[in-house]
Image (tube, rainbow, N blue to C red):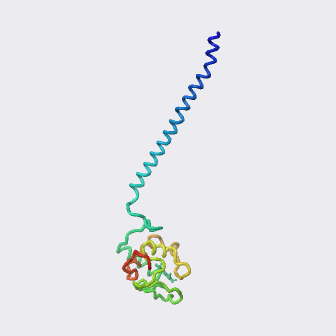
Amino acid sequence: MSESRSHEGLKPVQEYGILALLVLIAVPLSMWMGLRDGLDLVKRADWKRETAVPAAAPAKGTADAAPPSTPEGVKRGEAVFQANCVACHGSNADGKGPAAVAFTPPPRDFTDPKAKWTQGRSPAEVFATIAEGVQGTGMAGFAASLSEAQRWDLTHYIRSLPGIGKSADAEDP
Ligand code: HEC
């Protein structure tokens, strides 16, 4: 009788002991496994990033997706220019459109390599100018009225003109 009582007295201690042991093993184990899975995910994401993204450093802003200039794109750009820009910039792109006199500063002359550009002549900058316009001037933004593809074609067309100058990727001094 006394033996069975002492056995009953020990039992809870044994049970708690096993439980505590389980907790002591299970908690760090699950934490470690979670951490390992997390690290695996990070590693896999790293791998994906390395393989999915082209090596070229992305240019600023929307130019991340800058398509290369092609003769066809320049041609399409010229058509978009004739349809949307000549009132001010002129059909010869010389800044002498019929409405040009109404604007101070005047529309940019894209045929003059010495023309002073205010927003920069790199592909990203010209693209941004066409999308957003130039605040406080007659140059409006065309992000709403022209598609992104049309704006890139325009960018490539304008950059094919003499006014872009020799150092086409350089900012204006
Ligand atoms: C209502 C007149 C007007 C129209 C239409 C117009 N522009 Fe302009 N644009 C201007 C004026 C004015 C400036 C000069 C802004 C300045 O000096 O900062 C200018 C400047 C520019 C510049 C040069 C900004 C710089 O960095 O100096 C680009 C590029 C340009 N326009 C592209 C276009 C394109 C492309 C179109 C047609 C989709 C167009 N513009 C339609 C008036 C116009």
Give percent across and percent down for residue 29: 50, 35
Q: Residue at x 57, y 29 (%)?
A: 20
In the image, residue 53 sits, relative to residue 18, either above or below, namely below
Give percent across and percent down for residue 131: 50, 73
> Which of the pair 122/32 is nearer the observer?
32
Place residue 157 in its image quadrant: bottom left
Q: Is residue 84 visible?
A: no
Q: Is residue 7 visible?
A: yes
In the image, residue 152 sits, relative to residue 31, either above or below, namely below
In the image, residue 36 sits, relative to residue 171, either above or below, namely above
Query: From this viewpoint, which residue is outermost toward the top?
Result: 1
How many numbered discs? 0
Q: Please state if 141 lies on the left or on the right of 5 as rendered.
A: left
Query: From this viewpoint, which residue is outermost toward the left?
Result: 71
Quarter occupied by the C terminus = bottom left
> Which of the pair 169/69 is nearer the observer?
169
Quarter occupied by the N terminus = top right
Give percent across and percent down for residue 108: 46, 83
